[in-house]
Image (cartoon, rainbow, N blue to C red):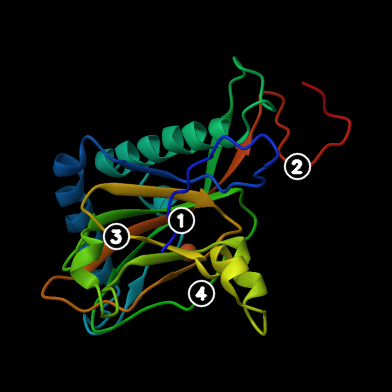
Amino acid sequence: MAKKTKSGDNPNIVKLWPTTFLVKRFAHYQRVNPALLELFYAHREREQRSPQQAYASNDDLLRQYPLHQELNDLAEFISQSIVEVAREANRGLWRDTEKVQVSLTGLWFQISNNHSFHEMHVHGNASWSGVYYVRAGDCSPDAESHRGRQPNGVTRFYGPHVEHMAGGFGDYGNLYLHDNSWDSYPQDGKLCVFPAHIKHMPFPYVGEEDRVIVSFHAQVYNSSGAMNYDYGFTN
Ligand SMILES: [Fe+2]
């Protein structure tokens, strides 16, 4: 697991390229989540999919249910959180007072059980992605309780160092390279926003209750609509 390191006071040391995540709990999850569960199970029911199968909806939920109050409440919370983390990651690059717009280009839900999982992946065509835990099921937020066994249904993120592990050299000098993943433990109402290019994988999940999550990816525009690289861009 990734451990926090002290920045230290050595003036000769430069630490580069941190990865910025946001982790926070939705203040209204106790009101919103039950309504989302009702919506999601009814949605799955209409498709007559077996409860034994892992289920993922299409990623256009916001277009399918434009008037659903709680879904929109969640989307608003997600959008604000993306601005929060993107503003921090772009500190010194964004103008302080600049308004930005978030376009949730995809938002979908997944219901998992019976050891279902996804392989490691990244999200394309987006700058930020995230996961919101509607129902954590039997995933414990206490990492210590999983010591010595595979964590159940966590979302595991892999840092850039993982690229260098295959066939790489390992010794005491590059111990930090071995420490290349971080687990987000599901918790009802918890949101985790991460850069879309970061590799991640939901671990197999099994439990009395299904694990239910909302996943999303987003593009962010500035006030002039710019979203892609523009080498003529000045702040
Ligand atoms: Fe994903």
**Taking the image as drawn, is residue 139 in sight?**
no
**Taking the image as drawn, is residue 135 in sight?**
yes
Residue where numbered disc 1 is placed: 60
Residue where numbered disc 2 is placed: 228
The residues bearing labels 1 and 2 have C-alpha atoms spaced at a distance of: 23 Å
Q: Nearer the viewer, mark 4 or mark 2?
A: 4
Q: Which mark is residue 185?
A: 3
Q: Which mark is residue 120?
A: 4
Task: Work out whether 132 lies above or below 199.
Answer: above
Residue 199, how many percent across, how many down? 55, 66
Q: Nearer the viewer, mark 3 or mark 2?
A: 3
Q: Residue at x 43, y 36 (%)?
A: 81
Is the CB–ligand 1 distance for label 2 below 8 Å? no
Tell me the amino acid under the disc marked 1.
Asp
The residues bearing labels 4 and 1 have C-alpha atoms spaced at a distance of: 22 Å
Q: Earlier in the sequence, mark 1 or mark 2?
A: 1
Q: Earlier in the sequence, mark 4 or mark 2?
A: 4
Please tell me whether mark 1 sits on a helix, a strand or a loop.
Answer: loop
